[in-house]
Image: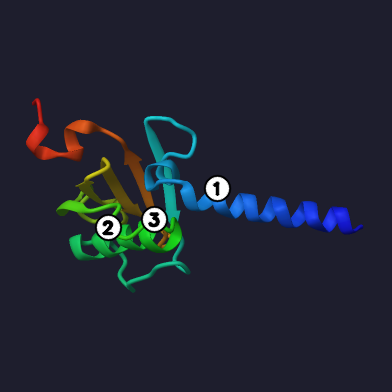
């Protein structure tokens, strides 16, 4: 029984150490694909609005990376404030925001349950505008 307890303690400590060595990029794209999907539920973040605006999108993004994913401070920096647009004029849930950071770009939207959905894509063209080849 004592050996089992020691083994469990070792595994927990090892898992904790491994989680701390993960970069924010590893957390944003956990399966090594070109993009990752994330969500903040209304219980994790809610600004009381029915749709996203640029300021709400910025706060939601910072909440995702700093609070939910526990990225290191300043590991993700927003290069340009989110740009938001309503796709269908009379449908507030169709407001979508786009922003890019030092790691890649995010597309944010809010669903009927007031959850904020994120699509993150690692794309060097958007990660540093000075290096753009477009």
Q: CA distance from mark 3 to mark 2?
A: 8 Å
Mark 1 nearby-residue class (10 Å; few <14, some 14–19, many ≥20): few
Q: Which quarter of the rendering shows the C terminus?
A: top left
Sequence-wise, which precedes: disc 1 or disc 3? 1
Numbered disc 2: secondary structure = loop
Can residue 84 be seen in this snapshot? no
Which residue is denoted by mark 2 in the rendering? Answer: 74
Which residue, as the protein is rendered here, is positioned at the far top?
133
The spot of residue 40 in percent (x, y) is 43, 59
Which residue, as the protein is rendered here, is positioned at the far bottom?
48
The residue depicted at 38 percent of the width and 48 percent of the height is 24
Q: Nearer the viewer, residue 126 or 55?
A: 126
The spot of residue 84 in percent (x, y) is 18, 53
Tell me the mark number nearer the camera, choosing from 2 and 1: 1
- Dot label at residue 18: 1
Mark 2 nearby-residue class (10 Å; few <14, some 14–19, many ≥20): few
Mark 3 nearby-residue class (10 Å; few <14, some 14–19, many ≥20): many
Q: CA distance from mark 1 to mark 3?
A: 14 Å
Q: Which quarter of the rendering shows the N terminus?
A: bottom right
Q: CA distance from mark 2 to mark 1?
A: 20 Å
Query: Does residue 33 sit above or below 59 in this rendering?
Result: above
Query: Does residue 11 sit above or below 58 in this rendering?
Result: above
The residue depicted at 10 percent of the width and 31 percent of the height is 132
Left or right, residue 10 beside residue 132: right
Which residue, as the protein is rendered here, is positioned at the far right?
1
Which residue is denoted by mark 3 in the rendering? Answer: 71
Query: Does residue 33 sit above or below 92 in this rendering?
Result: above
Left or right, residue 32 beside residue 56: right
The residue depicted at 56 percent of the width and 52 percent of the height is 17
């Amino acid at each position: 029984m004592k050996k089992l307890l020691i083994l469990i303690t070792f595994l927990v400590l090892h898992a904790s150490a491994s989680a701390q060595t993960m970069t924010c990029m590893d957390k944003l794209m956990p399966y090594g694909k070109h993009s990752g999907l994330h969500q903040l539920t209304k219980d994790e973040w809610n600004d009381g609005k029915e749709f996203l605006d640029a300021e709400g999108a910025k706060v939601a993004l910072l909440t995702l990376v700093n609070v939910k994913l526990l990225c290191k401070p300043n590991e993700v920096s927003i290069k340009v404030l989110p740009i938001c647009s309503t796709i269908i004029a009379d449908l507030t849930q169709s407001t979508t925001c786009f922003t890019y950071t030092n790691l890649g770009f995010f597309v944010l939207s809010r669903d009927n349950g007031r959850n904020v959905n994120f699509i993150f894509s690692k794309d060097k063209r958007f990660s540093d505008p000075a290096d753009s080849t477009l």
